[in-house]
Amino acid sequence: MGMRISCKLATVMQREQVRLAPGTSVVSFTFDDAPVSACTTGADILARHGARGTFYVAGGLTDRIEEGRPCHSEANLRTLHAQGHELGCHGYSHQRYDQATVDHLTEELDRNAAFLADIGVDPEQLNFAYPFGAYSLRAKRVCAPRFVSSRITGNGLHRGQADLNLLGSYRLYGSTVADTHWRHAIDSVAAGGWLIVNTHEVAEDFGPYGCSPQTLEAMLRAAVESGCKVMPVSAAIRLWRSL
């Protein structure tokens, strides 16, 4: 099966729909790879607004350099967990899983679950983000029964309902860090729905996959002032299921 067909089938098969009650607006800020700047600067910005985020962690990146930037330490992760942020799964070795075999994918996810469990995260309540946003129908079939949700990149505004096994995300990097772009996203979710934002580092010298502290602060403030509830992915899912 070609990858294009596999991805297309993944959008319509193995779905777990959650109803998004009208009149409720939620924004979830997520950080892939959990760079040090996200764990410190990003987390501090959220805390100033009484908010918490979701940090998708690949255990194999601990104390490593990714895209020229330092990734989290185990101490960073323990601090985030103690502060009430969510630690999610991003695989262990930070590699594409769209063409991985079932055995390899299972081994990777088991390894990362054990890593997060050592930090105190419940492996039965993990949310997942595909590294590089690379998914397939086979990967979805492996991930669906393991995780509360699985997230890709793109199509981050959900209305009416959302497939927990293939959640989208608004990429707060590249051209989308422009004020006019993210303000439109906030204006849209303020009318009702769930906006899942993802970025990587939060630094003045941010690269192609990160944002500045000023941009994160401004988007977060706009979300709060628009009446949106700002919460981690896990808390958002609990909220939607309760409405």
Image (cartoon, rainbow, N blue to C red):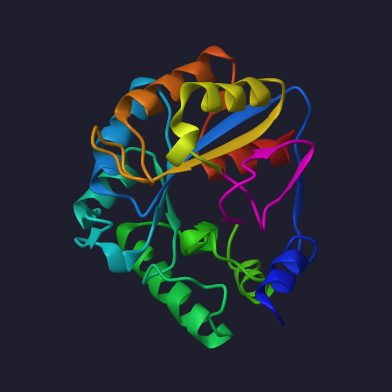
Which residue is depicted at the point 38% across and 70% down? Answer: 92
Who is closer to the viewer here, 178 or 59?
178
Task: Residue 85: name its quadrant.
Answer: top left
Instruction: Give the image location of residue 209, x and y in percent.
Output: 39, 46
Q: Please indicate whether residue 30 sits to the left or right of residue 15 in the image.
A: left
Residue 173 visible in this rendered orientation of the protein: no
Who is closer to the viewer here, 123 or 13?
13
Q: Is residue 165 magenta?
A: yes
Residue 147 visible in this rendered orientation of the protein: yes
Q: Is residue 77 above or below residue 46?
A: below
Count of picture labels? 0
Report the span colored magenta. 149-169
Q: Is residue 115 above or below residue 243?
A: below
Which residue is depicted at the point 62% across and 48% down? Answer: 168
Q: Please indicate whether residue 168 sits to the left or right of residue 11 in the image.
A: left
Which residue is depicted at the point 52% across and 73% down? Answer: 97
Instruction: Give the image location of residue 91, x and y in percent.
Output: 44, 67
Q: Is residue 61 above or below residue 227?
A: below
Q: Is residue 227 magenta?
A: no
